[in-house]
Amino acid sequence: AQRVTQPEKLLSVFKGAPVELKCNYSYSGSPELFWYVQYSRQRLQLLLRHISRESIKGFTADLNKGETSFHLKKPFAQEEDSAMYYCALSVNAGGTSYGKLTFGQGTILTVHP
Amino acid sequence: DVKVTQSSRYLVKRTGEKVFLECVQDMDHENMFWYRQDPGLGLRLIYFSYDVKMKEKGDIPEGYSVSREKKERFSLILESASTNQTSMYLCASKVGGSGNTIYFGEGSWLTVV
């Protein structure tokens, strides 16, 4: 069965410092990896996905199949980045992907002024 | 803009009561999901549906059932609520097939006393 691990429950950095939120996964097939973010009093929303290879709000994430990791990085954190971040993995089921997501435990990022 | 609406944002129910959580999406999405969000555990999939009247168990289906009589509506049912079902419940939907974004509702806070 697939599994997603986010080792840090809490992460605190100062504004302008680099930030890295760790995510490791276990899955025998070819996964789709995502980062979702939940700002205070807002709904959970997609931040980025590995297949897009894009930078969103200054965040990037590279899929490392050798290390089975998908860490989220930003070179200069901003106070508005403070939120709950979830790493998630999507698998195929019987050749049809229903888009089921398996989530990690989440990391609360706090960016101090 | 995709809208996933959970009609009840906050509920307080007594142990043993039958509880209905309703979710409606307005984008004609084939797939719908119910997740449970708990601190330190992340999001866990309870049930999902890939078509009207079709449903499949997720990772933690015990104590829950679902109903999908119409494409836009996916209901989560707690037949006999228990205190360990106190949680935040998130509904989500997506277009069928792989590589499509999942959209979440705002969540329903359920407290069972």
Image: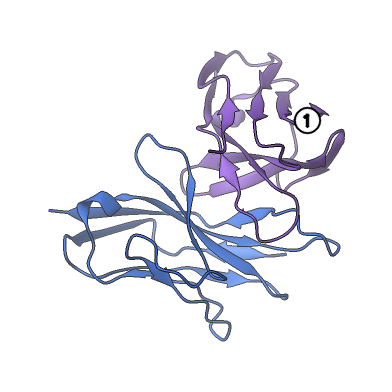
Chain colours: A blue, B purple
In-image side of B8 versus B63 (left or right): left
Q: Position of residue B14 (x, y in %)?
A: 60, 13
Q: Position of residue B86 (x, y in %)?
A: 55, 28
Q: Residue furthest front?
A: B1
Instruction: Name the residue nearer the viewer: B50 or B43.
Output: B50
Name the spot of residue B109 as percent of width and height, x first.
Answer: 51, 26
Q: Residue at x 57, y 38 (%)?
A: B2
Tell me the quadrant of the picture where the N terminus of chain A can be found.
bottom right
In the shown orientation, is residue B72 left or right of residue B1? right
Q: Look at the numbered disc 1 and give the secondary structure of its residue.
A: strand
Say if B79 sits above or below A29 in the image.
Answer: above
Q: How many marks?
A: 1
Q: Is residue B70 above or below residue A67?
A: above
List x then y, in percent, for residue B28: 72, 37
At horizontal 73% and vertical 24% (from top left) the residue drawn is B77
Residue occupying image coordinates x 76% and y 59%: A97
Q: Nearer the viewer, residue B2 or B98?
A: B2
Residue that mark 1 sits on: B65
Amino acid type of the residue tagged 1 in the rendering: Ser
Residue A58 quadrant: bottom left
Q: Residue at x 52, y 31 (%)?
A: B107
> Up-down: is B18 above or below A12?
above
Q: Which quarter of the picture shows residue A102?
A: bottom right
